[in-house]
Amino acid sequence: QSRTTMDGAAQTWQHTVDQLVVVREGLEAATYARRLLTFLWDSERIRVRSFQCFVLNFLLFLGSIAVMDLAIMPIIRMLLRASSITSAVQVHVEQVLGALYQLLWVFPAYFISFLVSCSWSKCW
């Protein structure tokens, strides 16, 4: 009984080690910088499209997150603190507004960015 439990544990451990090796190899292949840079350098079209996608996503997402975190949410917090709402309700209001921001701005913006990026590279 004890021997089969040890064999099962050893097999489980070996399976986990094998999976970690595959994950490591995948990460190495995905981050092979020299191959990526060579690929980008050889094709002007890919270079231009990659730069366009980077700029679009950088400006759209980081810009909108910065505006939300550095401008809109501080104003909302200031207005909530000035009101007679308790701090527990203020936290919930901030969470709801954050979720609405994600739902009504980030997800549609991501979808539109995906469509624009696909149209640039003609993926359909």
Image (cartoon, grey):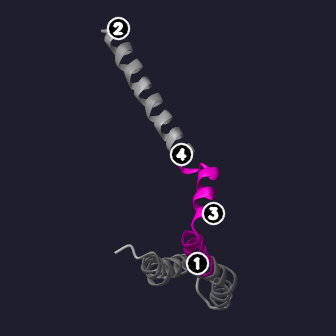
Tell me the element at label 4.
helix
Q: Is residue 8 left or right of residue 21?
A: left
- C-alpha distance separating marks 1 and 2: 60 Å
Tell me where the magenta segment starts and ends, as one range: 30-59
Q: Quadrant of residue 37?
A: bottom right
Q: How dense is the environment of label 2, judged by Cα within 10 Å: few (below 14), some, or many (20 and up)?
A: few
Q: In the rendered structure, which disc, 1 or 3, sits on the residue that comes first in sequence?
A: 3
Tell me the element at label 3.
helix
Residue toward you, 112 or 44: 44
Label placed on residue 68 = none
Residue 96: x and y in percent read 49, 79
- C-alpha distance separating marks 3 and 4: 18 Å
Mark nearest the camera among 1 and 2 is 1
Label placed on residue 3 = 2
Q: Mark 4 points at which residue?
A: 29
Mark nearest the camera among 2 and 4 is 4
Let me know if residue 42 is in the magenta part: yes
Q: Name the residue under label 3.
A: 41
Q: Quadrant of residue 115?
A: bottom left
Let me know if residue 16 is in the magenta part: no
Q: In the rendered structure, which disc, 3 or 4, sits on the residue that comes first in sequence?
A: 4
- C-alpha distance separating marks 2 and 4: 39 Å
